[in-house]
Image (cartoon, rainbow, N blue to C red):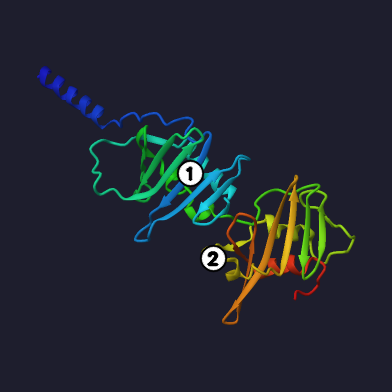
């Protein structure tokens, strides 16, 4: 009787040990430290995969290289690096899972400045369930769905949000030549004045925001500048921030009675911007009625 009870207790204990999740392998503490480039691909349903490639410049600014060129959305970059730095790991992924039927949700390639490469594969999981993740050189994990299921940015979120996503403050200048010629100078990040003293009918920081604010309506497919009316721009704006000066062109096209407004900067692809923003910069802050 006593021997039978001992065997039963031992069997229960072994069963508990067998059911206990395996301790996860170590997540690299420096996974996102000193990154030089990254690519992110996403698969969703029957849609073809969407992929974006980005690289960090010597000045530390991230730029998208494909499918569109320009400065990457800094919020999306920060969001991705935050999620990957220290995820909430539930356990190691149980062994023996079938690999044949795995559906990939994200695949992220990370490249450091020394050339070290690592590939992270995020597998599809049911709603609210732990997310299986495979990290090259580290192992396989189950990660909290609160993080990986919802917080990894879609590739489209990295596309340039504006012509020049940066901060402009005291000493910054904006010179516009075209329909209306005018110059603005920054007193602070939000305070700007007209260089010639003219009184503006609109907030001057809104004019500056056409370049540095989140004005991108869409990112059209790459094409010659003539396809966007930018080969013969209506206006050219030169902005200088902390000694860095960049030239931006503004143009438009009309097809089937619809006018679409575009702008482009150096070493980037054109973006579509709203009619209101385009007119504010092109017609200038002194016009009470847009042309």
**In the image, 8: left or right of 200?**
left
**In the image, 113: left or right of 167?**
left
Q: Nearer the viewer, residue 76 or 269?
A: 269
Q: Are marks 2 and 1 in contact (CB under 8 Å)?
A: no
Q: Nearer the viewer, residue 128 or 185?
A: 185
User: What is the residue that sits farthest to the top in this orientation?
Assistant: 2
Rendered residue at 44%/53% (across/down) = 51
User: What is the residue that sits farthest to the right in this orientation?
Assistant: 197
Residue topped by disc 1:
38
Q: Residues within 10 Å of mark 1 (few under 14, many from 20)?
A: many
Q: Tell me the SS state at disc 1.
A: strand
Q: Closer to us: mark 2 or mark 1? A: 2
**In the image, 163: left or right of 173?**
left
The N terminus, quarter of image: top left
Residue topped by disc 2:
223
Q: Residues within 10 Å of mark 2 (few under 14, many from 20)?
A: few
User: Residue 136 at what x, y percent from top left?
Assistant: 37, 36
Q: Quadrant of residue 281?
A: bottom right
User: Residue 265 at what x, y percent from top left?
Assistant: 65, 57
Of the image marks 2 and 1, the number of the one nearer the N terminus:
1
Rendered residue at 53%/34% (across/down) = 34
Q: Nearer the viewer, residue 266 or 288?
A: 266
Q: Nearer the viewer, residue 15 or 23?
A: 23
Disc on res. 144: none
Mark 2 and mark 1: Cα distance apart in space: 25 Å
112 over 149 or under it: above or below: above
User: Residue 259 at what x, y percent from top left?
Assistant: 62, 76
139 over 63 or under it: above or below: above
Q: Quadrant of residue 271?
A: bottom right
115 over 177 or under it: above or below: above
């Amino acid at each position: 009787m006593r021997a039978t009870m001992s065997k039963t207790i031992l069997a229960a204990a072994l069963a508990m040990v067998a059911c206990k999740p395996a301790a996860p392998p170590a997540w690299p503490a420096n996974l996102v430290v000193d990154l030089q480039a990254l690519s992110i691909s996403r698969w969703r349903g029957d849609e073809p995969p969407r992929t974006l490639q980005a690289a960090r410049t010597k000045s530390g600014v991230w730029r998208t290289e494909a499918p569109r060129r320009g400065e990457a959305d800094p919020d999306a970059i920060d969001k991705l690096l935050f999620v990957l730095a220290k995820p909430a790991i539930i356990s190691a992924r149980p062994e023996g899972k079938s690999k044949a039927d795995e559906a990939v949700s994200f695949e992220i390639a990370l490249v450091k400045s020394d050339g070290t490469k690592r590939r992270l594969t995020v597998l599809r999981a049911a709603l609210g369930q732990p997310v299986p993740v495979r990290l090259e050189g580290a192992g396989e994990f189950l990660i909290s769905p609160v993080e990986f299921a919802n917080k990894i940015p879609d590739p489209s979120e990295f596309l340039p949000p504006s012509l020049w996503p940066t901060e402009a403050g005291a000493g910054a200048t904006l010179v516009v030549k075209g329909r209306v010629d005018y110059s603005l100078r920054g007193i602070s990040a939000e305070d700007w004045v007209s260089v010639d003293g003219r009184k503006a009918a609109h907030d001057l920081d809104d004019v500056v925001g056409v370049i540095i604010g989140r004005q991108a309506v869409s990112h059209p497919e790459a094409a010659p500048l003539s396809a966007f009316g930018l080969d013969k721009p209506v206006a050219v704006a030169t902005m200088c921030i902390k000694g860095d000066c960049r030239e931006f062109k503004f143009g438009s096209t009309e097809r089937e009675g619809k006018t679409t407004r575009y702008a482009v900067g150096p070493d980037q692809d054109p973006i579509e911007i709203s009619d209101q923003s385009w007119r504010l910069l092109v017609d200038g802050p002194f016009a009470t009625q847009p042309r």
